[in-house]
């Protein structure tokens, strides 16, 4: 019986979007990026079709120049990760260059798969 109760609690925590300590699940935007430090950008290398990044319009080849208003060129790799990750359901704003145009995308963080 205790095992069953623990499994039910784990399922509830998953559905509610929090971990077993009562905090939020940490998620991301679902895109794979590579840091190009000399250029001061994150280059998107993959965007699986069933992710929030894809739904927001992020595409492979896009260059992320800012995250929540902070320029990528001024941030350390750990800071970049910390800005992209966050509680599931929260949003992050990216400034993205594609070709010769710049746009802002707002992407909701989702659970990791």
Image: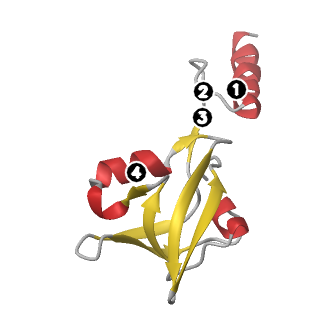
Please provide percent x and percent y for residue 100.
50, 89
Number of residues whose C-alpha sits closer than 10 Å to that of mark 1, classed few (under 14), some (14–19) or many (20 or more): some
The image quadrant that residue 42 belongs to is: bottom left
Please provide percent x and percent y for residue 79.
34, 48
Left or right, residue 85 beside residue 79: right
Please provide percent x and percent y for residue 16.
75, 29
Report the residue at 48% width, 74% height from top. Answer: 44
Mark 3 or 1: in front is 3
Q: CA distance from mark 2 to mark 4?
A: 20 Å
Label 4 near label 2: C-beta < 8 Å? no
Residues 45 and 1: in front is 45
Mark 1 lies on residue: 13
Which badge, 3 or 1, is on the more N-terminal residue?
A: 1
Mark 4 lies on residue: 81
Mark 2 lies on residue: 19
Label 1 near label 4: C-beta < 8 Å? no
Label 1 near label 2: C-beta < 8 Å? yes
Mark 3 lies on residue: 25
Q: CA distance from mark 4 to mark 1?
A: 24 Å
Which badge, 2 or 1, is on the more N-terminal residue?
A: 1
Report the residue at 50% width, 78% height from top. Answer: 97
Left or right, residue 101 beside residue 42: right
Above or below residue 10? Residue 71 is below
């Amino acid at each position: 019986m205790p095992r069953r109760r623990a499994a039910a609690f784990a399922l509830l925590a998953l559905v509610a979007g929090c971990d077993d300590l009562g905090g939020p699940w940490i998620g991301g935007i679902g895109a794979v990026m590579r840091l190009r430090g000399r250029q001061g950008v994150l280059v998107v290398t993959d965007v699986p079709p069933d992710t929030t990044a894809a739904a927001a319009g992020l595409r492979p080849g896009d260059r992320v120049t800012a995250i929540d208003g902070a320029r990528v060129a001024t941030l350390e790799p750990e800071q970049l990760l910390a800005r992209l990750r966050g509680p599931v359901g929260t949003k992050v704003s990216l400034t993205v260059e594609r070709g010769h145009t710049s746009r802002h995308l707002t992407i909701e963080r989702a659970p990791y798969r």
